Amino acid sequence: MNLKRRLRGHAEVHTGALNDILFILLLFFLIVSTLANPNVIKLSQPKAKSDTKAKQTVVVSIDANNQFYVGTSKVSLEELKAKLQPILAKETDQPSVVINADKNVPVENVVAVMRVARELGARSVLAVDKNGVQ
């Protein structure tokens, strides 16, 4: 007569909490990846051999239609100095204006932005394609 029961429980792993955590992490990385690059204006940049690293105080973009953007807000060339002045005034070190221009933009527009940056006491840096000259 065998009085002992031989019932063994089956080992189970409860993954309900793990699924919740993974879902929250997935949402977090999706949201962060959309905020990683605030410059959402698509441009085809000119190519260069050298690469200059500069701290970006403000980014001025010029698209193929010769429209100017400070960050992502659209401005005209006449409003550019008034828009850049308060942004550059906050910077304690040497402020820099990164010019992100489409390769089909006339040089006069790029020079106009450089002139405004110089008048405000900022250094201007031209953003180029990293692949180099082909």
Image (cartoon, rainbow, N blue to C red):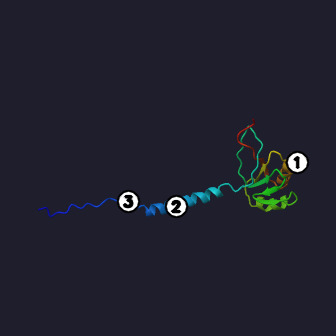
Which of the image's four quarters has the N terminus?
A: bottom left
How far from the left and from the top, in percent, is residue 55? 71, 51
In the image, 35: left or right of 103?
A: left
Residue at (71, 48) in percent of width and height:
54
Q: Which mark is residue 23?
A: 2
Q: Which residue is mark 1?
A: 108
Q: Amino acid at mark 3?
A: Val
Is 35 in front, or is 60?
A: 35
Q: Residues within 10 Å of mark 1 (few under 14, many from 20)?
A: few
- In the rendered structure, which disc, 3 or 2, sits on the residue that comes first in sequence? 3
Residue 94 sits above or below residue 9 on the image: above
Residue 50 sits above or below residue 1 on the image: above
Q: Amino acid at mark 2?
A: Phe
Q: Secondary structure at mark 3?
A: loop
Q: Secondary structure at mark 1?
A: helix
Q: Which mark is residue 13?
A: 3
Q: How many marks?
A: 3
In the image, 112: left or right of 94?
A: right
The furthest residue to the front: 1
Residue at (73, 43) in percent of width and height:
129
Is 15 in front, or is 68?
A: 15
